[in-house]
Image (spheres, rainbow, N blue to C red):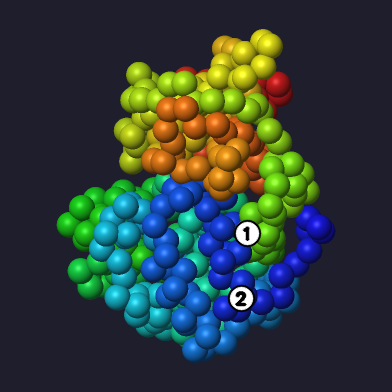
C-alpha cells in the first residue's frame, strides 16, 4: 500500500472508508453511532455525484475557500441530528456575509464527522474539497488549527444549530471560540460552522496537506484488513503509527488531574497493563481526547500527537467512551504534523494548553 497515494475524488463507494478513517483520527469517538451520517453522505454523493479532491496549488490562487465543521458534542449531534440542509445553508450564509461565492471547501479537521461535512457541503453546492485540514486530528477548540497558527482570520464565521438558529460572528479567533462555546448549551449542544474564509494561495502554507486522502487511505485499510498484524503494518505505512504497547485495560475512571479552564473536558484515566514478562503499565490521561501516555512513570508522548486504541479482538478502533475494564488493546501513537511541534504549535495545542503540568517530548528534548 502506498502510504502517500493521493485520492482524486470521494464518491459513494468511498464513504465506508471515509467514516472508518475519520474514526481513527477522531479516536475519542471511534465506535460512536455514525450510521445516520454514513447513510446521509452516501445518499448525497449518489444524488449529486463524486466530489473532487484538489490540492491548494491546483486552484487559482485567488479562489475563495472556507472551512466547514462542527463545534460541540458528538453525543448531542447523534441524539439531535441535523435535518440535512445545514451544510449548504451555513456555507451559503457565509458567502452572503462575504459578498462573494466560495470556490472550494476545506475541512476544519479531517476527523470524526468533521471529515464528512465538507464533503456534504461541497456536493450540495457543486464545489471541490481541498485535500487538507487545519488539525490533522481532532482538537476541541475551533481556534486550535494550523490556519490560526498561520495568521488566517477565523471570522467572519456563520453557524447554524440543531434548532435552526443562524448566527454570524466577527471577532478574534480566541473570542470566536468563547462565543461559540457559550452558545452551545442553548443551541442543542452543537453548531455547524463555516469559518476561516481565505484564498487558495494561503492554504499552500497554512493547511496540513493531504489530510483527506490520508483519512480515506487509512479507512480503506481498516475496512479491508482481516488480521491484526496487517492492520498494524498498514497503519505504520499510511499514518506513521507506532505501537507504544499492548495489553489489558486494568483501570478506568475519573482523573485526579484538572483540565484547563478553557477546555470542554471530562478528565479520565485509562491504565493498560502489558501482558508480558516486565508487565509495563501504560497510563493514558484524557480530556474527551487521549492527551498523553506515561509508561512506567516516563512520558512517552503527548498532545498534539495522536493517541488511539485498537481493539485486538474486533480489530476496530476503540473510542474513549466505549473502553471497558478487561479490553485487550494496542496503544497507538501518530506524530502530529510538523507545524504542531513548533513553539507556537505547542503553545496552542500542547500539554500546557490542556492544563497538564508536563512538557511535550519535543520541548523536553530540545
Residue furthest right as drawn: 2
Who is closer to the viewer here, 85 or 233? 233
Question: Does residue 20 lie above or below 29 as drawn?
Answer: below
Q: Position of residue 9 (x, y in %)?
A: 66, 77
Give the image quarter of residue 303.
top right
Q: Position of residue 65 (x, y in %)?
A: 55, 73
In the picture of the structure, the residue carrying the numbered disc 2 is: 13
Marks 1 & 2, CB-CB < 8 Å contact:
no
Please tell me which residue lies in front, 89 or 172: 89
Residue 341 in the image: above or below residue 274: below
x, y percentage for residue 264?
33, 41
Q: Name the residue nearer the viewer: 244 or 226.
A: 226
Badge 1 crowding class, 10 Å Cα cut-off, few under 14, some 14 to 19, many 20 or more, is some
Q: Give the x, y percent position of residue 293.
A: 56, 26
Residue marked by disc 1 = 223
In-front residue for pair 329/290 = 329
Residue in view at x 60 percent, y 46 percent: 315
Amino acid at each position: 500500500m502506498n502510504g502517500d497515494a493521493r485520492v482524486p475524488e470521494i464518491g459513494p463507494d468511498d464513504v465506508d472508508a471515509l467514516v472508518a478513517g475519520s474514526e481513527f483520527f477522531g479516536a475519542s469517538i471511534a465506535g460512536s453511532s455514525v450510521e445516520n451520517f454514513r447513510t446521509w453522505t452516501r445518499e448525497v454523493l449518489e444524488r449529486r455525484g463524486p466530489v473532487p479532491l484538489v490540492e491548494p496549488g491546483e486552484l487559482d490562487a485567488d479562489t475563495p475557500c472556507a472551512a466547514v465543521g462542527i463545534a460541540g458534542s458528538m453525543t448531542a449531534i447523534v441524539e439531535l441530528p441535523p435535518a440535512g440542509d445545514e451544510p449548504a445553508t451555513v456555507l451559503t450564509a457565509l458567502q452572503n456575509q462575504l459578498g462573494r461565492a466560495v470556490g472550494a471547501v476545506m475541512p476544519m479537521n479531517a476527523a470524526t464527522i468533521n471529515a464528512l461535512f465538507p464533503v456534504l457541503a461541497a456536493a450540495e453546492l457543486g464545489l471541490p474539497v481541498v485535500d487538507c485540514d487545519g488539525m490533522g486530528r481532532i482538537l476541541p477548540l475551533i481556534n486550535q488549527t494550523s490556519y490560526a497558527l498561520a495568521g488566517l482570520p477565523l471570522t467572519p464565521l456563520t453557524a447554524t444549530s440543531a434548532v435552526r438558529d443562524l448566527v454570524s460572528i466577527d471577532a478574534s479567533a480566541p473570542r470566536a471560540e468563547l462565543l461559540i462555546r457559550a452558545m452551545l448549551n442553548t443551541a442543542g449542544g452543537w453548531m455547524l460552522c463555516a469559518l476561516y474564509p481565505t484564498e487558495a494561495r494561503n492554504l499552500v502554507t497554512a493547511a496540513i496537506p493531504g489530510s483527506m486522502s490520508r483519512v480515506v487511505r487509512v479507512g480503506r485499510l481498516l475496512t479491508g484488513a482481516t488480521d491484526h498484524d496487517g492492520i498494524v503494518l498498514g497503519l505504520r505505512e499510511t499514518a506513521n503509527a507506532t505501537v507504544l504497547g499492548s495489553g489489558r485495560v486494568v483501570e478506568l475512571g475519573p482523573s485526579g488531574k484538572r483540565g484547563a479552564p478553557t477546555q470542554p473536558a471530562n478528565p479520565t484515566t485509562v491504565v493498560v497493563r502489558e501482558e508480558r514478562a516486565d508487565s509495563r503499565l501504560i497510563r493514558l490521561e484524557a480530556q474527551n481526547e487521549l492527551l498523553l501516555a506515561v509508561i512506567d512513570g516516563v512520558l512517552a508522548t503527548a498532545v498534539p500527537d495522536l493517541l488511539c486504541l485498537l481493539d485486538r479482538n474486533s480489530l476496530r478502533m476503540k473510542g474513549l467512551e466505549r473502553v471497558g475494564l478487561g479490553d485487550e488493546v494496542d496503544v497507538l501513537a501518530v506524530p502530529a504534523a510538523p507545524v504542531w511541534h513548533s513553539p507556537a504549535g505547542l503553545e496552542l495545542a500542547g500539554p500546557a494548553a490542556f492544563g497538564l503540568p508536563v512538557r511535550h517530548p519535543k520541548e523536553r528534548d530540545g
